[in-house]
Image (spheres, rainbow, N blue to C red):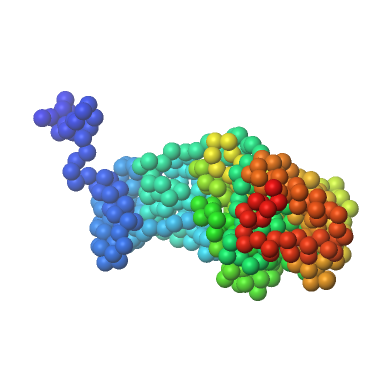
């Protein structure tokens, strides 16, 4: 039939306008999903070609995902799929940053329109998969259609509560680090004396050449082996390139590194994006672990980048320079609604730099776990060079199973009667008598 002005009426189904069978907008959505899911490169290529033809057919004024499909698009350009991390700028729109480029701003970064950002509740750090296309007379491509956010299809996506509005509680779920197959008992020792829980905020206090990198490597692999559901990020700031290569080959997790030959701005951008990315994952109920090496170099980068505020602490540290590093370190927490962000960061001491000492003193006491390494033990080649008396975890009784907590208390009392040099050797010898931490606990309870 026809309407009042002689226009054909749209079919109605269940009180709502029914989509036409060959509606280009609906076909664009379906083809985008098919080309994303297909493993067949030939089939995927054919679907993309059809997608390009449909994009050219969509009439001006049609809207999808907040963007106007109009003649502004270059008819010679192809619709392509991209995956990246979104960064929202002050104007309200966003850019897709590439992990391969350490999330640094590039001329070719795709633009996400402000309407699309607002409609889908996008925030900096969200991982998005989208269809993009070049506009006429523009170098940058524009996101025309969202396929997935945080690996969830756009059709089922619902924005989460913001990270800082979620309820923070004491860590009470135990991260197992050791394995019966390990001949090295250092992770068993950490489980008993400085346990790590989901949501832990830990400092590894490390003089030079005391084995902090090896400990970080073992902690990362211990969590990965025992808790495959946890997402592990290793964030290396101002690090030696050869150290980055070594850790990339040895660690089961994602490595994000800004080497010492990179500018300060890259250190800061990488830090911000990794922490935002972690928070977005925790908002969806994920368990995320960030191993940061080091919080000292991160604070140095912020101090060097900041314009002087007029208040300078001893060692040349600006009073405002530590605000962002403290914000990041303080983000570690166990979320009552589900999910956790665990941060284990190294702090450099005894480096001969007064600035490093000031930075450490500012962070001392802000964590709920400290693992202190001893230079004298390292010089004697006693590893792990842990200062047992100075190391510990707050409220460890909430993290450790009751029998573990009881055995750990007895173990500490036994070691406290020994000299500093003999403590670590006696601890390792005692642990080597038992094939697993469970057998050790049974013997000590």
Given residues 35 and 217, the one toward you in this image is 217
Residue that protrudes farthest toward the bottom in the picture: 242
Q: Is residue 443 visible?
A: yes
- Quadrant assignment, res 189: bottom right
Given residues 267 and 279, the one toward you in this image is 279
For residue 304, side relative to residue 245 (left or right): right
For residue 296, side relative to residue 132 (left or right): right
Quarter of the image for the N terminus: give it. Answer: top left
Q: Which residue appears at 81% of the width and 60% of the height?
A: 423
For residue 89, side relative to residue 301 (left or right): left
For residue 75, side relative to residue 439 (left or right): left
On screen, 138 above or below 1? Answer: below
Q: Which residue appears at 66% of the width and 71% of the height?
A: 243
Q: Which residue appears at 51% of the width and 55% of the height?
A: 228
Q: Is residue 104 visible?
A: no
Counting the numbered discs, the total is 0
Looking at the picture, how far across and down is residue 121, in whole percent?
Answer: 48, 39
Residue that protrudes farthest toward the left in the picture: 1
Looking at the picture, how far across and down is residue 168, in whole percent?
Answer: 63, 37
Q: Which residue appears at 61% of the width and 72% of the height?
A: 245
């Amino acid at each position: 039939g026809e309407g009042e002005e002689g226009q054909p009426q749209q079919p109605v189904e269940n009180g709502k306008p029914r989509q036409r069978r060959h509606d280009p907008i609906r076909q664009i959505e379906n083809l985008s999903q098919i080309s994303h899911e297909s493993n067949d490169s030939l089939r995927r290529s054919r679907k993309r070609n059809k997608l390009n033809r449909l994009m050219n057919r969509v009439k001006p004024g049609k809207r999808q995902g907040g963007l106007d499909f109009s003649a502004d698009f270059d008819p010679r350009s192809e619709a392509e799929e991209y995956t990246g991390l979104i960064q929202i700028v002050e104007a309200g729109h966003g850019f897709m940053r590439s992990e391969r480029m350490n999330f640094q701003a590039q001329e070719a970064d795709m633009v996400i329109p402000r309407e699309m950002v607002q409609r889908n509740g996008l925030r900096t750090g969200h991982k998005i998969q989208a269809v993009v296309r070049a506009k006429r007379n523009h170098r940058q491509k524009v996101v025309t259609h969202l396929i997935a956010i945080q690996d969830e299809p756009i059709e089922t996506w619902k924005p989460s509560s913001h990270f800082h509005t979620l309820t923070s509680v004491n860590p009470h779920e135990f991260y197992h680090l050791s394995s019966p197959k390990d001949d090295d008992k250092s992770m068993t020792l950490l489980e008993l004396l400085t346990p790590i829980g989901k949501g832990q905020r830990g400092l590894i206090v490390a003089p030079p050449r005391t084995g902090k990198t090896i400990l970080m490597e073992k902690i990362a692999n211990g969590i990965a082996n025992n808790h495959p559901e946890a997402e592990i990020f290793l964030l290396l700031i101002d690090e030696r390139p050869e150290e980055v290569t070594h850790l990339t080959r040895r660690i089961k997790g994602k490595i994000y590194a800004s080497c010492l030959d990179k500018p300060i701005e890259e250190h800061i951008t990488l830090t911000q994006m990794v922490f935002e990315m972690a928070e977005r994952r925790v908002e969806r109920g994920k368990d995320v672990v960030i191993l940061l090496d080091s919080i000292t170099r991160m604070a140095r980068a912020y101090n060097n980048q900041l314009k002087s505020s007029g208040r300078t602490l001893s060692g040349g540290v600006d009073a405002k320079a530590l605000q962002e590093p403290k914000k990041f370190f303080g983000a570690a927490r166990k979320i009552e609604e589900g999910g956790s962000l665990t941060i284990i960061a190294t702090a450099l001491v005894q480096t001969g730099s007064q600035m490093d000492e000031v930075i450490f003193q500012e962070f001392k006491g802000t964590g709920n776990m400290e693992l202190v390494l001893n230079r004298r033990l390292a010089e004697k080649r006693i590893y792990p060079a842990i200062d047992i008396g100075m190391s510990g975890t707050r409220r460890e009784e909430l993290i450790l199973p009751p029998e573990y907590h009881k055995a750990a208390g007895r173990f500490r009392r036994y070691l406290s009667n020994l000299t500093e040099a003999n403590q670590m050797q006696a601890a390792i010898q005692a642990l080597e008598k038992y094939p697993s931490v469970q057998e050790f606990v049974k013997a000590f309870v």
